[in-house]
Amino acid sequence: MVFTLLKNFLKGGLAGWFAKAGPAVELRLGGQRLRFDAPADFAFALAARTGVTPARIHDWQHRAAADLEEEARGIVALERRLTELRARCEAGAGSYAAALDELGVAVFSKDHDWRVMFAALLERPRAEESYLRVAVDAYLAYLAARRDVLALVRDSRRPAPAMAHPQPTLVFSADQTTAQFERDELRRLPPGEAVTIKLARGASISLKLARHRFSLSHQRGWSLMTDDGKCYTLHPGVNSVGRGRDNDVPLDADFRNVSRKHLLAQPLDGDVIVLTDVSAHGTYVPPTALAS
């Protein structure tokens, strides 16, 4: 009798604890079955999917200007629709599941398996509103990054104004003095274009983000070290680097010339990493590190 009462109490207590912890969700993404025990875990995983892929940026580099303008308008329109959808759902004027089902998964990008993920969530017998809310918020962050990088690519393709007397590139130091940039030492990456860097295991190179010096190291994995010794490990996939707190590598505000989203770094198999400059003030690397 006592054992039965204790068993029922524990069963009810554990059931209540799991109910408070939130439902678990399993999704198949990228050929893997992933389990998320809470919406917070799901949000953490989606943060890595809010950057623009180097392949997408490379494609933009070869698209006509009219195509890029049309895509920019489409991004803004979808941002507006999703923002309005979110506002309605948060106000209790409908559910995320019904609103997204009406919108259709075809509006979502195939990059980062976004379309597959939304389809999988909506196909669940009982779509979890908390997970759909997280997915919509993360996709809005992805659209914002995509809009910003696309604008940078469009700007980089506009011809620069002609200069009667070309001036050497100058770099401002902390004491407001200027020094001529050593072009033989480092070369600026073409804005918005994915560039392949080859670096043997155990080696490192110096590079600059704007006027700030860093080092890129390839040991067991890849890492980026600031000039004051702080080290950031680069994870597989695309790493965004910049002063914005939403970056994979969020740099301190002291790096004033570094853009909020400055650089995309994607380690590949072997000794190769792909760097994409998406900044206003440039990323500079040694010419000898550029893969042939």
Image (cartoon, helix red, strand yellow):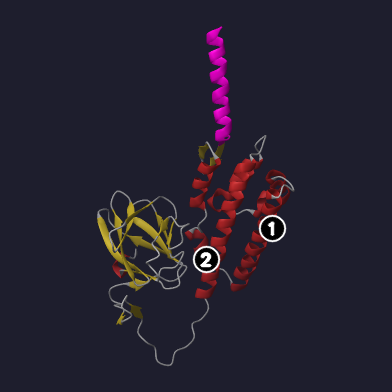
**Label number found at residue 237:** none
**Which residue shows up at 53% across the image and 61% down it?**
145
Q: Nearer the viewer, residue 55 or 26?
A: 26
**Which residue shows up at 31% across the image and 82% down it?**
177
Question: In the rendered image, which quarter is residue 163 located in?
Answer: bottom left
User: Mark 2 Cα within 10 Å, few/some/many (few <14, many 20+)?
Assistant: many
Q: Which residue is mark 2?
A: 149
Considering the numbered disc 2 on the image, is that residue within a helix, a strand or a loop?
A: helix
Q: CA distance from mark 1 to mark 2?
A: 20 Å
Magenta includes 22? Answer: yes
Q: Residue 161: image x %, image y %?
A: 49, 86
Number of numbered discs visible in the structure rendering: 2
**Label number found at residue 81:** 1
Whether the residues at callouts 1 and 2 have beta carbons within 8 Å, the answer is: no
Q: Residue 25: image x %, image y %?
A: 57, 36
Residue 11 visible within the image: yes
Q: Nearer the viewer, residue 129 or 116?
A: 129
Residue 104 visible within the image: no
Please state which amino acid type lies under the numbered disc 2. Answer: Val
Span colored in magenta: 1-25
Q: Earlier in the sequence, mark 1 or mark 2?
A: 1
**Which residue shows up at 51% across the image and 52% down it?**
49
Please state which amino acid type lies under the numbered disc 1. Answer: Arg
Question: In the rendered image, which quarter is residue 125 located in?
Answer: top right
Q: Quadrant of the C terminus?
A: bottom left
Magenta includes 15? Answer: yes
Q: With respect to residue 67, does 118 lie above or below?
A: above
Q: Nearer the viewer, mark 1 or mark 2?
A: 1
- Left or right: 185, with 84 as reference point: left
Q: Residue 26: image x %, image y %?
A: 56, 36
Considering the numbered disc 1 on the image, is that residue within a helix, a strand or a loop?
A: helix
Instruction: Characterize the magenta stretch by its predominant secondary structure.
Output: helix
